[in-house]
Image (cartoon, rainbow, N blue to C red):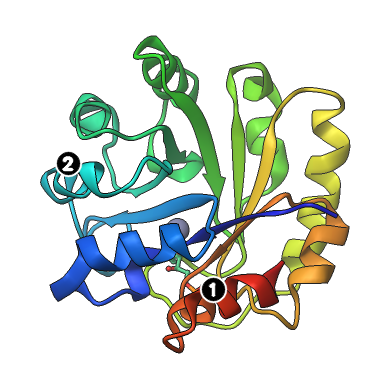
Amino acid sequence: MTVKIAPSILSADFARLGEEVRAIDSAGCDYIHIDVMDGHFVPNLTIGPAVIKALRPHTTKVFDVHLMIEPVDPYIEAYVDAGSDIITVHAEAGRHLDRSLQLIRSFGRKAGVSLNPATPESAIEYVLDRLDLILVMSVNPGFGGQSFIPSAYDKIRRIRQMIGDRPIEIEVDGGVTAANARDVAAAGARVLVAGSAVFRSADYAGNIAALR
Ligand code: DX5
Ligand code: ZN
């Protein structure tokens, strides 16, 4: 099974972010997963559009931007201008998910939606045709290094069924390791986010290869 690997730079050395992005690029990653947290939707604060913009010249790989912020609509344009390729919003973070997804696509970017572990897949049933990516959270968002919540397997399988032949990628985020990557892919995911599993040791290429 071919999977894409999206290292989360949340686990990178923030004092050397440009260098870290170049390192995962040459180590063979597919996407660069960027976790944006606001200290309100999730209990942690990370980086914003200025940092993403500064990283943009360091790689040509896809910037997969995971927005854990509420509200989200007023900030979409800033993440477009920063150079995001995929912009993912949380289904729980706004009252008008359909509008948020239309807004992202109006800028010509790919639109994703993320579901927290407690959110059922039915939350996205009526927006499937507006989606390029579905991000299934397998931890409660906010921090790297947490353990994979097994109920995600069932959710991935159900989403796989729901999307039918639509060209939507299923991505999984949180607690993905070389030990469970095969099961995550078998359930139907095709993009694996990994923070600690990639940055755990200096051998990024080896860590990415182990996930594949
Ligand atoms: C969690 C973030 C994840 C996180 C994954 O809120 O969305 O992307 O960095 O980290 P690991 O792979 O360490 O669970
Ligand atoms: Zn993430």
Q: Look at 58% across and 18% down and name the residue there.
A: 130
Quadrant of residue 137 within the rendered picture: bottom right
Q: Earlier in the sequence, mark 1 or mark 2?
A: 2
Q: Residue at x 80, y 30 (%)?
A: 163
Judge by depth and name the residue closer to the eye, 33 or 72. Answer: 33
Q: Quadrant of residue 124?
A: top right
Which numbered dot is residue 53? 2
User: Percent from the top left, x then y, of residue 35?
Assistant: 35, 57
Residue 28 found in image quarter: bottom right
Q: Residue at x 70, y 79 (%)?
A: 178
Disc 1 under 8 Å from ligand 1? The reply is no
Left-right relation of 176 to 103: right
Query: Mark 1 or mark 2, which is nearer to you?
Result: 1
Residue 26, percent across and down? 44, 61
Q: Are marks 1 and 2 in contact (CB under 8 Å)?
A: no
Q: Nearer the viewer, residue 142 or 8?
A: 8
Outermost residue, top side: 106
Using the image, tell me which numbered label, if any, was put on residue 34: none
> Where does the N terminus fall, quadrant-wise?
bottom right
* Residue that badge 1 annotates: 205
Q: Judging from the image, what secondary structure is the residue with disc 1 in?
A: helix
Q: Does residue 208 appear anywhere in the picture?
A: yes
| Residue 46 visible in rendering | no
Above or below 173: residue 16: below
The amino acid type of the residue labelled 1 equals Ala
Rendered location of residue 126, percent (x, y): 67, 21
> Helix, strand or loop at disc 2?
helix
Instruction: Give the image quadrant in which the ligand numbered 2 is located.
Output: bottom left
